[in-house]
Image (cartoon, helix red, strand yellow):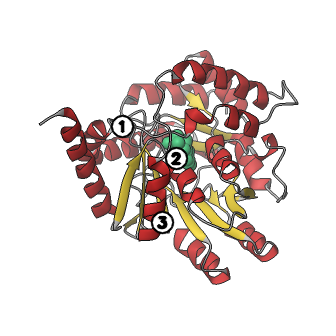
Amino acid sequence: MNNIQNNNQTIEKVEDKLRFLFKKKYVALCSRATVAIYATLLSINPKDYVIVPANICPSVINAIFQTGFQPIFVDLNLNNFNICLKSLKFILNKHKNISAVIVPHFYGIPAEIEELIHIVKNENDKILIIEDVAQSFGVKTDNLFVGSFGDVSIFSFGYSKIIDVSTGGAFITNNIELYKNIKYVISSLKLKNHNLLNLKEKYRTRYINILQNKNPDDDLLKIGSDFQDLFIHRCNSLFSKNLLKELNVFSENKSKRIFNYNEYKKNLRSNKFFLPDTDDGFIPWRFNFLSKKSKKITELLRDKRINVSNWYPPINVYYKKAEIKTDLTNSIMLGKEIVNLWVDKKTSTSDIVKTSKLINSII
Ligand SMILES: Cc1ncc(COP(=O)(O)O)c(C=O)c1O
C-alpha cells in the first residue's frame, strides 16, 4: 500500500472514531479549529452577527470578520469561566439579527450547553450553535461528550490542547447540507505553506506590539488579514497518524491530567484564590485559578523558568471594528486575574510541589 492510501485509511479510522464518540453522522478532519469555524461561517447566511466570548484566541474573531460577520461579545460566568447565560439572554433580547453563537467549553469545563441551546433556539431556531471543543476534548456533561450538542462542533489538536499533536482540527455535524458546504470550502483553500515558521515570528512581534499598545494604528483584524495564510489553509492530514495514537491512549492522558490537577489542589493554599466549579465530566486543560496577585505569581514563576500563562484576556478592545459594546465585567476580571499552570503528562509531581511552594510563598 502506498503512503497516500495508508494516510487515507488512517484519516478514515480517526473520523470513524470521532463519529462514534460524538454520535454524529458527518465528520471531517481539517488543518485547525479556526478553519472549521471559518468554513462553517462561510457556509451560512445571512451574514449578520455572531455571539462569542471575548476571552478567546484572535484567530476565531478574525474568522468572524473575514467571513463577513460582526462579533457581539458575551460576558463570562465566573463560576464556570464559560458563557454567562444572563448576558446571552440580554444580547438576544436586544439584537434580533444573530446568525450564530460560538460556545466554547473553556479550560475543559463544560459550558451550560443544554440550557444555552434551549435559550437560543427558543429565541430563534435558525441561529446556528457552533460548539467549540478546542480546549475540552473528552469532557462530558450529563454523561455525553461536549461536542455532541451543537449544530456544528469544532475541535483542535494543536499546541497545548488536551490532545496535542501540534496541528490539526475537525468538525462534526448531523446536517448534510452544512457538511457538504463546509467540506467544499475547506477543499478550496490553499494548501499549507511550509515556510510559515518565518511568518509566525513576524506575526508574533506585531501581535505583542498590539497587546502592549505600541502601535495605535494597528489592530488584531489588520494582522489577521495580513497573516491570513497562517490560520486559514488546507492540509494533508498527516497529523492523523499521531492523532489516532493519542486517541488510543486517551484514558491515560485524561487520568494524568486529573491526577495533576488534584496534586495542585493538595499542595496549593487554595483558600487564597478562586477556583471554578467542576464536576465529574471535567478534564483539566490547565490548572486555572483567579488571584488578585496573578501578575506577581506569573513574574515569579517565569523568573524560575516555570511554564505559566494568563489565557485568555478579553481581546474585544483590540478590534476597532467591533461595533456593539456589551458589559464584559466578568471577562475583564478573568483577564486580570487568571493564572494557568500546566497539567499535561510532562508535568511531574515534583514540578507541582515546587511550583506550589513558590506560589504559596507570595499569596
Ligand atoms: C477556544 C478556542 N477555540 C478555537 C481555537 C483555535 O484553534 P486552532 O489553533 O486549532 O485554530 C482555540 C485555540 O487556542 C481556542 O482556544
Question: Please, what secondary structure does the residue beneath circle 1 have?
Answer: loop
Q: Nearer the viewer, mark 2 or mark 3?
A: 3
Residue that appears at 72% across and 73% down? 89
Question: Please, what secondary structure does the residue beneath circle 3 have?
Answer: helix
Percent x, y of residue 3: 20, 33
Report crowding for label 1: few under 14, some 14 to 19, many 20 or more residues within 10 A (C-alpha).
some
Q: Quadrant of the C terminus?
A: top right
Which residue sits furthest left? 1
Report crowding for label 2: few under 14, some 14 to 19, many 20 or more residues within 10 A (C-alpha).
many
Q: Distance between the Cα atoms at labels 3 and 1?
A: 22 Å
Find out if the beta carbon at label 2 lies less than 8 Å from the nearest ligand 1 atom.
Answer: yes
263 relative position to 200: left or right:
left
Find out if the beta carbon at label 3 lies less than 8 Å from the nearest ligand 1 atom.
Answer: no
Q: Quadrant of the N terminus?
A: top left
322 relative position to 277: left or right:
right
Q: Amino acid at mark 2?
A: Val
Dot label at residue 178: 3
